Image (cartoon, helix red, strand yellow):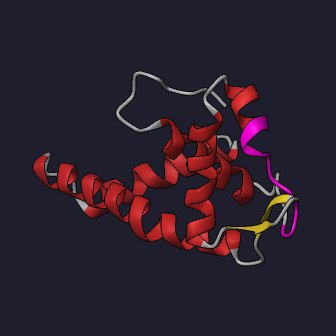
Amino acid sequence: MIIDNDGSKPIYVQIAEWLETEIIKENFKVDEKIYSQYQLAEMLTINPATAAKGLNILADKGILYKKRGLGMFVTGEAKQFIMAERKEQTLRKLVHELVLEAYRLSVDEKEIMEMIQEMNKEIKGEKQ
């Protein structure tokens, strides 16, 4: 993970989002121990309190749970929760911006769908 120190997004939020992505990609599975605040601090060269704040965001959302003296672990609902939350918040916002810009540029739905299908093929590595 690369921390963007100059960005508008706080470091602890970047950490939480990165860990969420790692959970979605199943690099951390259900009931698996996640990095400690000290491991994150060392890996990312940041203050352990900042790392702890990122972990606590995930614990507060119910994505991680604490085992006293052992660390934090991934909950059974973590992946589904993250995906639903990102779909509702992030994806909806991006689609809104896309549709608004398409409207401004007089691009119709058919053309937008063709662009989406083309990008989808590129991402999946399919030949055109």
Which quadrant holds the C terminus? top right
Can you say whether 29 is above or below 106 in the image? below
**Displayed quadrant of residue 6:** top left
63 or 109: nearer the eye? 63
Which residue: 39% across, 28% down?
A: 7
**Displayed quadrant of residue 76:** bottom right
Residue range (magenta): 30-39
Question: Residue 30 at what x, y percent from top left?
Answer: 84, 69
Question: Residue 89 at what x, y percent from top left?
Answer: 40, 65
- How many numbered badges does the structure rendering display? 0
Q: Main secondary structure of the magenta part?
A: loop
Q: Is residue 75 left or right of residue 109?
A: right
Can you say whether 1 is above or below 65 in the image? above
The answer to whether residue 114 is seen in the rendering is yes
Question: Residue 114 at what x, y percent from top left?
Answer: 41, 54
114 or 100: nearer the eye? 100
90 or 56: nearer the eye? 56
Which residue: 67% across, 31% down?
A: 1
Which residue: 43% across, 38% down?
A: 10
Q: Is residue 103 left or right of residue 81?
A: left
Q: Is residue 81 left or right of residue 68?
A: left
30 or 88: nearer the eye? 30
Which residue: 73% across, 57% down?
A: 23
Residue found at the very far front of the displayed protein: 69
Q: Tell whether position 32 is magenta.
A: yes
Q: Tell whether position 12 is magenta.
A: no
The answer to whether residue 128 is seen in the rendering is no
Can you say whether 120 is above or below 61 in the image? above
**Displayed quadrant of residue 33:** bottom right
Q: Is residue 6 left or right of residue 21?
A: left
